[in-house]
Image: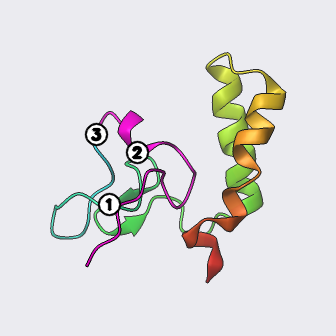
Amino acid sequence: MSHTYRNCQSCGMPLKRDAHGGGTEADGSHSTKYCSHCYQDGRFVLPDITAEQMQSRVRAKMADMGVPNFIGGLFTRGIPKLERWQA
């Protein structure tokens, strides 16, 4: 049975906000776990990034969108707990 995720298990973005409907698996099907920014064709877009680097990228992206820094910090503090970073 597949688990339904509300947020990308790499960057934390709400999957319902992904304009592409999620990342893609190698067979072209949609990923139910990762967004299109993090995961394409069954592979991570940035395979060598660390959880801390991902937090910085997401905070910067949120700042670009006009989100206050403290909100970005709150939003990204859970990134290291997501499935991708548990390996």
Q: Is residue 53 magenta?
A: no
User: Picture quarter containing residue 1?
Assistant: bottom left
Q: Which residues are magenta?
A: 1-20
- Residue 41 location, x and y as percent? 28, 63
Q: Residues within 10 Å of mark 3 (few under 14, many from 20)?
A: few
Residue at position x 23%, y 57% in the image: 30
Q: Is residue 54 above or below residue 19?
A: below
Type of amino acid under label 1:
Thr
Type of amino acid under label 2:
Leu
Disc marking residue 21:
none
Drawn side of residue 30 relative to residue 51, left or right: left
Quadrant of the image containing the C terminus: bottom right
The mark lying in front, picked from 3 and 2, is: 2
Circle 2 is placed at which residue position? 15
Circle 3 is placed at which residue position? 20
Q: Residues within 10 Å of mark 1 (few under 14, many from 20)?
A: many
Residue at position x 38%, y 68% in the image: 43
Question: Alpha carbon of mark 1 to alpha carbon of mark 2: how far?
Answer: 8 Å
Drawn side of residue 10 relative to residue 85, left or right: left
- Residue 10 location, x and y as percent? 54, 60
- The answer to whether the residues at label 3 and label 2 have Cβ atoms under 8 Å apart is no
Q: Is residue 87 above or below residue 73?
A: below
Q: Is residue 54 above or below residue 69?
A: below
Question: Alpha carbon of mark 3 to alpha carbon of mark 1: how far?
Answer: 12 Å
Circle 1 is placed at which residue position? 32
Residue at position x 80%, y 39% in the image: 73
